[in-house]
Amino acid sequence: MSEMQPNAEAVANDRHGRDPETATLDAVVVGAGFAGLYMLHRLRGLDLSVRVFEAGEGVGGTWYWNRYPGARCDVESMQYSYSFSEELQREWRWSERFSGQPEILRYANHVADRFDLRRDIRFETRVTAVTWDETAELWTVETDRGDRIAARFCVMATGCLSAARMPDIPGLASFGGDTYHTGHWPHEGVDFTGRRVAVIGTGSSAIQAIPVIAEQAAHVTVFQRTPNFSIPSRNKPMDDEYEALWKSDYTARRLKARTMRNGILYDLNPKGAMDVPEEERRREYESRWLAGGTAFMAAFSNLATCADSNQTAAEFVRAQIRSIVRDPAVAEALLPRDYPIGTKRICVDSDYFETFNRDNVTLVDVRKTPIEAVTPTGVRTSDGSDHGADSIVLATGFDAMTGALLKAGIRGRSGLALADKWEAGPRTYLGLMTAGFPNLFLITGPGSPSVLSNMMVSIEQHVDWVTDCVAHMRARGVQTIEATEEAEDAWVAHANEVAFRTLYPQANSWYMGANIPGKPRVFMPYIGGVGVYREKCDEIAAKGYEGFRLSAGPALRTSEAAE
């Protein structure tokens, strides 16, 4: 296993400060996660001048910030990786079937060093304003370090789950102990030995963290509002034969994954759940449960569209929870009942439900007894109970998909703020661009498969599309590209139509923005599938970027040098 670390000198220089930068470049990329790193690599390949701004001290994006105990990817390691470099995908060796955060972060650092990406990244720098200059036809990007960069293109690679949601709980600031958010975990780690820990939230982060915290803490009190469906990961060390099998035919496997609905290559049963006898249906679910992972949802082809079929899968999982959790009352409280399975993010765990059999773990159902306040010594619920705590862990999720974009201070034509345009919900064409904001690209933005897919597959597809688009513009002397309002309206209507053919809108999920008070209820990702979406994007490009307005102008600054 390669464990290359960040270039120490480069990191140290950045931490010790630098002078603000003023320049005119071809492109600015915001974010140095997997999307930003690959975008930088591809734009460099066009001989464009590029600057990347990253708020963190290092690369990795989601995997830089989310260091909570048990943080792990729910896509198998052999598929959650870049495919653009044959040498890279063959030389890197994963140690587990589902990689943990430390290993994924090492991989991101390895990529940054292997392709010499750090020299164009400005760390510990947060973008504060992105403004379109209509006269110059350039974006002006400003940062909290005083940088002011003019650029032809701006690419928002800010990530879909990067704006942590802090809950508005009365008295939170009065708590006398330590408070942590899973999305901004201390890099040095946290020792919970002998401590009483209150965990607020039971989404994916909490489901991964709670078993690990419970092994260490004196007591864990879990405050649950909405029970979640979760499938055991069956994680294990990477099998040499399994790795060799993938690497023996990596190219074909990657190509096949790109045609799959969620960008993950696994066995999808073409039958509907109600089309087979009950005994066969149970065998299929049991086989998937024992194998572990999100492939459980591929047990039958219509679990996302047929309520009766979905109910069979949901009831199977509820039966598993009842069989695992020894206290019947606790088991019943952990059963998800008010939304179809899979319509909230399906979770993957390591002994989550088993953890509630521990003597040092207590479940509090906040639907029955809501949290009234955080006190200096713990958490008080509506029944008057005071749950003492030395530490509070906020596993309260993110302002998904739009949060980071709206915080960047983006203003397009006529000074229109993106926040104002999206006041009633995000509107994009293909999730790649939004009308009124020329030359501004969104990587895995709302309106694309994004969080419903293997993010690595969707990231590479978007970055490749943007790169090809920029090359197309340069070759034809095109100054700006912008989505038309008509194309945007049609895409939003299509995305909504496809979404409402499924069961997904029945859940109050973060896919719908339901976890953020006041956020418009709009199904944000495109549910039509990675393969279908890719074909549509390619078709639009082949037709001369149908639905986009391309305006002629001076050639890009570096085009003559590139020729």
Image: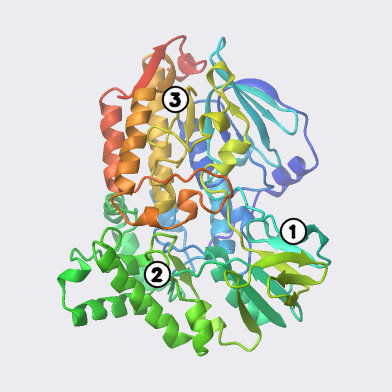
- Please say whether residue 356 is visible from this viewpoint: yes
Q: Secondary structure at mark 1?
A: loop
Q: Secondary structure at mark 2?
A: loop
Q: Which residue is mark 2?
A: 293
Q: CA distance from mark 3 to mark 2?
A: 39 Å
Residue 323, image quadrant: bottom left
Q: Which residue is mark 1?
A: 170
Compare residues 247 and 38 and report the one nearer the observer: 38
Asked if the residues shown at circle 1 and circle 2 are in contact, with their CB atoms under 8 angstroms apart, the answer is: no
- In this rendering, the label closer to the viewer, 1 or 3: 1
Q: CA distance from mark 1 to mark 3?
A: 40 Å
In the image, is residue 378 above or below residue 456?
A: below
Give coordinates of residue 433: x percent, y percent.
44, 30
What mark, if any, has residue 435 been given in the picture?
3
Q: Amino acid at mark 1?
A: Pro
Give coordinates of residue 324: x percent, y percent.
46, 86
Asked if the residues shown at circle 1 and circle 3 are in contact, with their CB atoms under 8 angstroms apart, the answer is: no
What residue lies at 69% left-to-right and 55% top-to-bottom? 168
Left or right, 451 with reference to 381: left
In the image, is residue 52 above or below residue 132?
A: below
Q: Quadrant of the C terminus?
A: top left
